[in-house]
Amino acid sequence: MYGRLPGTSGQLVLAFEENMRYITDVHAHYDEAVFDKDRAEVLDSLHKEGVAFIINSGSEIPSSKRSVKLAEEYDYIFASVGVFPLEAETERGGGYPDWLKEIERLSGHEKTVAIGEIGLDYRMIDEASDKDAYKRAQKEVFAAQIELSKRLLLPVVIHSCEADEDLLSMLDAHPCIGMIHRYYCMQDCGRELLDRGFYIGIGPQITYPGSERLTDIVKEMPPELMLLETDAPFLPNYPLEGRATSAMIEEVCRRIAEIRGDMTPEEAAVCAMENAKRLFGIA
């Protein structure tokens, strides 16, 4: 059966079947301005059609506040709060000199389930006037948030791009538990992260040509470390355009089943839901 869901620019997408009512999206950004005109319609429709729960992620102080606010407004939305690596210098030295105290305050909310998204991102390092300072700022903000997560007994949500070696070194110095969001790592790094017990979020990028890094890790990873995410509104399923929404996870489950061959799409959804409940402490 086909139907139209809000936020897909009128494109036809598969409607959820009764046995697909276990979809979880552990990393989304429904606080983004692109949802301002129809946010309630989109979220209500997603939950009605089968999305069990969503974790809305902060990227800096304002979006972390918005994530908590969304979690207060919807029973099926939870929040993660944190400072994204590309925002590290701005948040720390600019508008929020007490940024870590604010993240700690937001972490105390009853529906905050993780510190994130945090990590390292070196994609734009060639544009930095001082590359060492650029890396140092990200590492300091990352380390501070890892230590906060450990003190508060919360998992971390890690974004890492073109920083495999430094990521592993940071995790050696600051051991923690959590998930890797929007997987960019090389295979050796991915295997090391799995060995350390990190969960990995699988999202619409697995539907794209050239997604071999993610495809390979999906083949190898233990099912108990698999999570589902969209990073909505970013990166919709290939070849769709416009906003990504949690509805697109249904196709992600189909792709996971095809790649692995040891589970159905429904089993992938249920497995990921149980994993998410365990990692984030969601009843």
Image: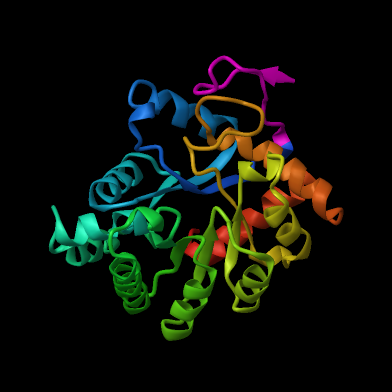
Residue at 28% x, 64% y is: 130
Number of disc labels? 0
Q: Is residue 19 above or below residue 140?
A: above
Query: To which quarter of the image does residue 74 belong?
Result: top left
Q: Is residue 13 magenta?
A: yes
Spot occupied by residue 21 in the image (x, y as percentages of width and height): 65, 40
Q: Is residue 85 magenta?
A: no
Q: Of residues 198 and 140, which is closer to you in this image? A: 140
Magenta-highlighted stretch: main secondary structure? loop
Q: Is residue 268 above or below residue 196?
A: above
Tell whether 247 sits left or right of 19.
left
Magenta stretch: give its range.
1-18
Q: Name the quarter where the N terminus is drawn.
A: top right
Spot occupied by residue 100 in the image (x, y as percentages of width and height): 21, 66
Query: To which quarter of the image does residue 272 belong?
Result: bottom right
Q: Is residue 142 above or below residue 36?
A: below
Instruction: Find the residue positioned furthest to the right.
Output: 261
Spot occupied by residue 185 in the image (x, y as percentages of width and height): 60, 62
Q: How is the image coloured?
A: rainbow
Residue at 33% x, 41% y is: 70
Residue at 37% x, 73% y is: 146
Instruction: Find the residue positioned furthest to the top.
Output: 10
